[in-house]
Image: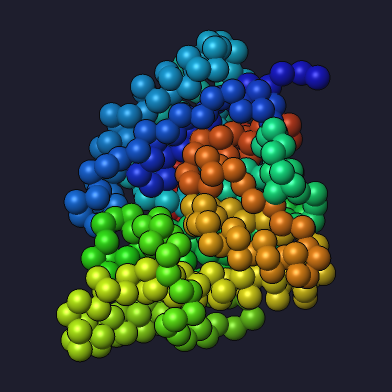
Amino acid sequence: MEHIYILAIESSCDDTSAAILCNNNVLSNCIASQQIHEKYGGVVPELASRAHQQNIVPVVSEALRLANITHEKINAIAFTRGPGLLGSLLVGISFAKALSMSLNIPLIEVNHMQAHILAHLINQNSDGSNNANPSFPFLCLTVSGGHTQIVLVRSENDFELVGESNDDAAGEAFDKSAKILGLPYPGGPLIDKYSKDGNPIKYKFPKPAAKDFDFSFSGLKTSFLNFISKNVAQNPSFIHDELPHICASIQHTIVDYTTEKLLNAASQYNIKNIAIAGGVSANTYLRKYLQEKCDEQKLKLFIPRFEYCTDNAAMIGIVGYFKYLNQDFCGLDVLPLSRFAI
């Protein structure tokens, strides 16, 4: 089989990442994270784009070094076109264009959300049934800080959006809940951490209303804020005393709500293969809870390795590989898209 080498670049938010893939095998996957946003409690777009400018050359160089290949071996460059922060996307796209021109090799635009889903098709060493590649068709719950979607995947290039959030994303609900509790950014992983010692059903929060398989999280955030404000007014040490139970309860609400929507969609579409993707798919409670529910309903669940959950270039590269096989290239006039329909 011909060896196809893809250089992949991901710069949609605050992580600068570059990867080298040979066909569907990852040779390197380098990520430079930005710590500066912690002091602001969220990503500052201008600071993110400046950090990308500083990081992209050394990250790409490191990816090539670890893969032990030279520029001359690269067949194409895949990059994130969107969705994401425009300034951050522009850095990655500009670099990809310049390198494409200098090496005279094609460019491949990639939808960031499709990449999260197709990360499941990266060739991995099997260490349990959850790391096997799903067969088509499968239903994927993509949960991150910016998106919550249910997508029916019929092939590498056939996606149907079944449901999505009407307002905020699940990851944002985690982070904003953590901020209300006074936890540092990013707070979602901390809620996961503290909830391990808490009772997930001690406190009840209303499930948001959204039609069919869509989601809504803005009302849940307001409800959580009101709950904390009321209890702190009555007991100033409430958060300190009850932190594990509070974290476990809000986490259970978000996970149970998204899981219920996903499994209802699986039932309606008669899909037996279920997958999760995106940064929130690293949440240990979501993984455990969804696995239990899938086992009850005789569904096969596919959970990505942790390194392929958060933003990374390997997932961009796997989309680039399949697009390369179809000769699906783009021109140098390509522009970033802050919104990019799946």
Query: How many marks on residues?
Result: 0
Residue, x 29% and y 52% (percent of image)?
Answer: 43
Q: Is residue 51 above or below residue 27?
A: below
How far from the left and from the top, in percent, is residue 260? Answer: 63, 75
Judging depth in this view, the residue of 227 and 120 nearest the camera is 227
Residue, x 39% and y 36% (percent of image)?
Answer: 16
Quarter in which the C terminus is drawn:
bottom right
Quarter in which the N terminus is drawn:
top right
- Look at the image and tell me whether residue 50 can be seen: yes
Judging depth in this view, the residue of 295 and 15 nearest the camera is 295
Residue, x 19% and y 51% (percent of image)?
Answer: 39
How far from the left and from the top, in percent, is residue 254? Answer: 49, 72
Residue, x 77% and y 75% (percent of image)?
Answer: 268
Judging depth in this view, the residue of 49 and 24 nearest the camera is 24
How far from the left and from the top, in percent, is residue 288? Answer: 60, 60
- Look at the image and tell me whether residue 316 can be seen: no
Q: Quadrant of residue 186?
A: bottom left
Q: Is residue 229 left or right of residue 6?
A: left
